[in-house]
Image (cartoon, helix red, strand yellow):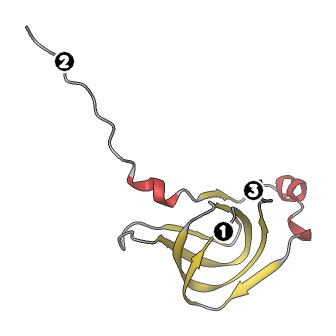
Amino acid sequence: MATTPTPTAEPDSSSALSITVETNPSDVRLSELGIQSWPKWGCPPGKYMLKFDAEETCYLVRGKVRVYAKGSSESEYVEFGAGDLVTIPQGLSCTWDVSVAIDKHYKFASPS
């Protein structure tokens, strides 16, 4: 009697980097979100260790960055830059490797 192997769920190695990047959102979408009324933040090139205590949505006006989740390898990163709308999950500890100075609008999610 033959048995069928039971599939096993493999852990998703990309789950640690559940950053979502929307490339070149429309002006209508940016207007609906009220991006221009959000605070601005910027930084020069360099490496920054950050921890996000709340979900952040940001729109990069200029810059380029690679984000490495804490404990990830050098080949596991998310890259985004000018013109991208990005959502960073609450609780993410990461390193931002900024190659081009960042200028962004940002908004943190309201605590629930």
Give the residue displayed 86% in from the left and 70% down from the top.
38
Query: In this figure, which residue is indicated by the disc labeled 3?
Result: 25
Label 1 to label 3: alpha-carbon separation: 25 Å
Q: Position of residue 53 (x, y in %)?
A: 66, 68
When asked about the image quadrant of residue 21, the answer is bottom right
Query: In this figure, which residue is indicated by the disc labeled 1?
Result: 53
How crowded is the residue under tag 3: few (<14 C-alpha within 10 Å), some, or many (20+)?
A: few
Q: Amino acid at mark 1?
A: Asp
Query: In this figure, which residue is indicated by the disc labeled 2?
Result: 4
The local secondary structure at tag 3 comes to: loop
When asked about the image quadrant of residue 30, the answer is bottom right
Give the residue displayed 7% in from the left and 7% down from the top.
1
Label 3 to label 2: alpha-carbon separation: 46 Å
| Of the image marks 1 and 3, the number of the one nearer the N terminus | 3
Give the residue displayed 60% in from the left and 77% down from the top.
64
Q: Amino acid at mark 2?
A: Thr
